[in-house]
Image (spheres, rainbow, N blue to C red):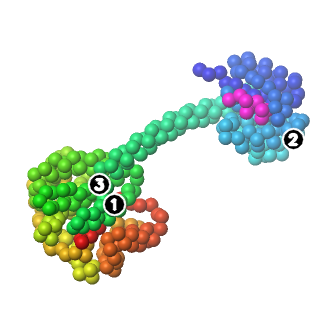
Amino acid sequence: MKTAKILLVDDNPDNVYLLEVILQARNYKTVSARNGREAVDAVTNDGEIDIILMDVMMPEMDGFEASRHIRNRKESAHIPIIMMTAKKRELGDVVRGLDEGAVDYVTKPFDEEELLARVKSMLRIKSLYDENRHLLSKVLKQQSLMDQELKVAAKVQLAMLPALDGYKNQHFKVHPFYRATVDIGGDFYDLMDYGDHKTAFFIADVSGHGPSAAMIVAMLKALLIGERSSFPPPSEMLRRLNVKLTGMIPDEHFVTAFFGVIDSVKGTVTFSRAGHPSPFLLTQGGGEIADLTTDGVVLGMFEEAEFGQATVKFSGGDKMLMYSDGLFEVWKGEEIFGYSRFRDLVKNNGRQNGEELVKSVIGEIDGFWDGESLRDDMALIAVEFV
């Protein structure tokens, strides 16, 4: 067990000697300083001082000023200071000493038992502080490691999202937006070549946030890749994903999803939905808005679930907008942005091109949100047909 080191600060050598005799007899280490300036230097240069016994009246720098300097330094602010004051100056010195940073006092001439009791009490406080500081250091170190791991996980998760920004072919352009509430989130989207002039779009939202949601996203990505090879129709794709997810993810989690297949030759979108907000199809130059909706429960809860399927036609200039509910479940105080406002926002800006539409929608939502904490991840993908 570490032997406590006590700094004795007094310009009277007899007082210092008496304190050394009392404290060293109890196996405490002692070091001394003749005035407040030397005390500040001693604390600055010696990182092992556990407690300070500080006289009030000293030349060069008195005990009050020295206490203030020691308390104002981060490295020494935690060291208990016991003021030593003459009885005739007791009240005024005690009040000022406590105000300057001392935590206790003793009066001169010393009562040995009282002095030792106060020293032991302050050392217990110092020991508890040191223990808490050590535990805090360990927690902060672990937190730092976790933060680093989360940053790596965030990069991995972003790498799972296709590079859709600026993506285009002869049939459509894609304009994506993604924002996670924390480093890693539960929203996910993908684009896949689906053979024979077809392209598949997938958007999903895993309930919850953080590492658990991100793990389910990674699982979902792997399952999607595995099932893609046979090009199942959207309703069958969701059925297969649901069967495999059910029983694999914790009961408190589920996944909403939308899967759509664009047939560029036929000019159609065939789609299926699993409890996900219905995407919008903006037609007639953006003047009309339709919901792409089918029956279908969330993924991962009911193994025998079936999913409806529908097909719509599109023309050049039409836009399909897929999104997660984080876009309209944004709060400002007690007010929510809301689905109706979000739908109207899309419709009112529907005549803009895909890139401008995404910017307008996000700009309006960010203006409402105004920097308050996000409660859900955000994903938005505009597909602009040419």
Depth check, front residue: 377 or 66 = 377
> What quarter of the picture does the N terminus occupy?
top right
Residue 41 highlighted magenta (yes or no): yes
Amino acid marked by disc 2:
Arg
Which residue extends farthest front? 170
How much space separates mark 2 and mark 3, taking CA atoms?
76 Å
Q: Which residue is mark 1?
A: 165
Query: What is the magenta range?
Result: 39-47
Q: Which residue is mark 3?
A: 162
Depth check, front residue: 226 or 265 = 265
x%, y% of residue 49?
70, 29
Element type at mark 1: loop
Mark 1 vs mark 2: which is more N-terminal?
2
How much space separates mark 1 and mark 2, taking CA atoms?
76 Å
Element type at mark 2: helix
Relative to 263, is 79 on the left or the right?
right
Q: Which residue is mark 2?
A: 89
Q: Residues within 10 Å of mark 2 (few under 14, many from 20)?
A: few
Quarter of the figure with residue 102: top right
Element type at mark 3: loop
Amino acid marked by disc 3:
Pro
x%, y% of residue 375?
39, 60
